[in-house]
Amino acid sequence: RITHLISIIQNYQYIEWKTSKKYYLDLLKKEISFFYNYSIDLVERFLNIIPIEEIDEFFKSNETPRPLTIRINSLRNKEENFKNILDNLGIQKIFQEKFLNVAGVLKRNNIKIGSSAEFLAGYFTLQGLSSFFSVISLDPQKGERILEIAAAPGGKATFISQIMENTGICVANDKNKLRLDSLVSTIHRLGIENSIVTNLDGSFFYSKMKGFDKVLLDAPCTGTGIISHDERIKLHKINSAILINTTLQKRLLISAIDSCKKNQEKKGYIVYSTCSILIEENESVIQYAVEKRNVQIVKTGLNFGIPGFVKYKNEKFNKKMNFCRRFYPHIHNIDGFFVCKLEKN
């Protein structure tokens, strides 16, 4: 029935009877909501983002678990030791590109990877492939001072330190004190030596410390890109969740910008990311920051993904919003994700 309704909507101009297109769209929303167990409000928001010809595949992809991926820790391993460790655990390297060459996918389902000796020794860590992208866009360099403003449980912060080869400083901050144990544990397990862990409200971090070369903000969000991990998101009161999250996201992003250095000789960079595909949590938040601070959107450095929206309904965004990158589960077979890079002028 969903497929039939999609076909009617796609070919509506050729249909002779006079029932409105809105009637079929409303039917489609109800069918998807009933069949996949979503709130009507969330279905409607997805229909505004995903092309009609892709919508069924999108909802199907949210029912399918993503491949389990890991990040090889080059601080604990030498390149020549990688292959034997991976083969023994049934892990296959999937990329040769810089930074992504430490990603692997688990090919065998009968191994408890998190309790293996290699995991406990810090040879690798579990990390979703999409979460690599914000760090790759940040492009950490040896000796830099970098801040991750909402760092727990530590996957991105430790990846930053790994790329910098334990040089410079990486400040890993998180407001939630209960999450610091997992952050500190990950740092120790992976052999990170250049991290400072802080427990400050990210919204006001700039008042305590600033002047960082680069800042990463992987913002708290509604999680609409990771429904395959948490089906409770399907029935969230999405309108109130968006209001709560976007208010926090804007505050955190402004704080991240203010924490970044302002230097004519070497510009500062801020990377903003979420595991949401909603425009309100992504392009709209970036638009707010561009209007409130002297920053500009620059290319992410990612040569894959779908460009960000420059227009949504009646709202027009900065023309450089297409430099942002979007990732979808039904297209890329990874968690839904958004990445934007800002340059502080």
Image (cartoon, grey):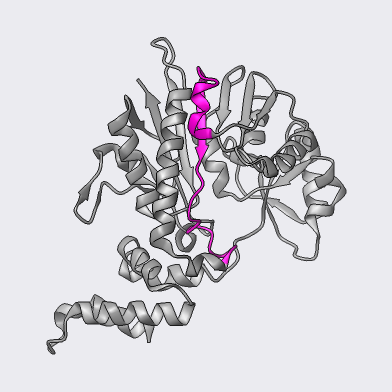
Which is more toward the observer, 215 or 241? 241
User: With respect to residue 174, does 19 lie above or below?
Assistant: below
Residue found 28% across the figure and 78% down from its top? 26
Observer-nearest of 257 and 67:
257
Residue at x-position 35% and y-position 39%: 286
- x and y percentages locating residue 267 in the rendered image: 42, 18
Magenta residues span: 202-230
Q: Please state which of residues 104 and 156 is positioned toward the viewer in this rendering.
A: 156
Which residue is at a point 42% across and 12% down the rendered structure image?
263
Magenta stretch encompasses residue 239: no
Q: Position of residue 76 (x, y in %)?
A: 79, 33
> In the drawing, does residue 86 fall left or right of residue 17?
right
Outermost residue to the bottom:
17
Rendered position, 22 above or below 198: below
Name the quadrant of the C terminus. Answer: top left
Q: Is residue 3 above or below residue 210?
A: below
At horizontal 81% and vertical 38% (from top left) the residue drawn is 81
For residue 226, side relative to residue 258 (left or right): right
Q: Residue furthest right?
A: 117
Q: Quadrant of residue 197?
A: top right
Seen as rendered, the residue at the extreme top is: 265
Total labels drawn: 0
Q: Within the magenta stretch, is there residue 224? A: yes
Q: Is residue 301 visible?
A: no
Q: Position of residue 195 (x, y in %)?
A: 69, 26
Quarter of the image with the N terminus in it: bottom left
The answer to which of 38 and 140 lies nearer the viewer is 38
Write down the quadrant of residue 17 in the picture: bottom left
Asked if residue 58 shows in the view, the reply is: yes
Q: Is residue 188 above or below residue 29?
A: above
Q: Main secondary structure of the magenta part?
A: loop
Percent x, y of residue 331:
45, 60
